[in-house]
Amino acid sequence: MADYTAFVEAGTALVELLRDNLTPEPLDNRETIALCSPHESENNQLTLYLYHIEEENQPMTAGYRMEGRDTQRIPPAQYTLRYLATAHSKAPAQMKEADQHRIMGAMAQTVRDHPIIPQRYLSGSSAEERAELHISLERTPLEQLLKIWNNTSKDYKLSVVIALTGVTIRSRRERRVSRVTEVTIGSEPAPQNRGNLP
């Protein structure tokens, strides 16, 4: 399980995967794919905006579990991260739509071809724990996408939601437990049958 840095490590891994697969075609610059709000895209052509974090329901028992010979720890939490992926074309007006479609098509192709982010893209505690991060395009109603954009007066741009699952964060809560070193087994004498007294 990764540490509290798991969220940023997951986002960085997703960006690096897309950079390797979307450049040099259809994008010629790796740095134009970035983690940022679509409203602050600047020179970026594909933005990934973490807009929702959800703890997954896990069939784990409450309380502590054994981690070592004499250590117990609270079970890790597992999360689903949802990113709004948005294409930003720098092409002339008459070519802007086609350019955005190419970017989104290449991104969808990459996500489909890599349902699990390869280990080489992981860093930090996620790499140490060999985390298994699953990615997919999530079916999201247009109304929900529009709500994300309605925070500003800017026009809506072509967007999809990428779901990243399997992100875990270990708990810092642990306790020491003493092991049983001695067991005493005793028995009480059986009651005597005194028979019928006169």
Image (cartoon, rainbow, N blue to C red):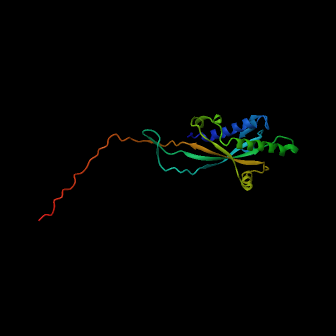
Residue drawn at the location 64% of the way across and 44% of the way down:
134
Task: Using residue 182 as the reference point, say whether residue 12 is left or right of it.
Answer: right
Question: Could you say where residue 186 lies in the image, as x and y percent from the top left?
Answer: 26, 47
Q: Residue furthest right?
A: 94
Task: Using residue 167 as the reference point, say whether residue 142 is left or right of it.
Answer: right
Question: Could you say where residue 110 lies in the image, as x and y percent from the top left?
Answer: 72, 41
Q: Which one is nearer the viewer's eye here, 196 or 63?
A: 196
Confirm whether residue 59 shows in the render: yes
Quarter of the image with the C terminus is bottom left
Examine the rendered structure and indicate whether residue 140 appears above or below residue 113.
below
**Total marks placed:** 0
Give the quarter of the image for residue 179. Answer: top left
Task: Using residue 177 as the reference point, say whether residue 20 is left or right of it.
Answer: right
Question: Could you say where residue 30 lies in the image, as x and y percent from the top left?
Answer: 75, 35
Q: Residue furthest bottom?
A: 198
Residue drawn at the location 29% of the way across and 46% of the way down:
185
Give the quarter of the image for residue 147. Answer: bottom right
Quarter of the image with the N terminus is top right
Give the quarter of the image for residue 86. Answer: top right
Confirm whether residue 36 shows in the render: no
Residue drawn at the location 47% of the way across and 45% of the way down:
65
Question: Could you say where residue 181 lies in the image, as x and y percent from the top left?
Answer: 34, 39
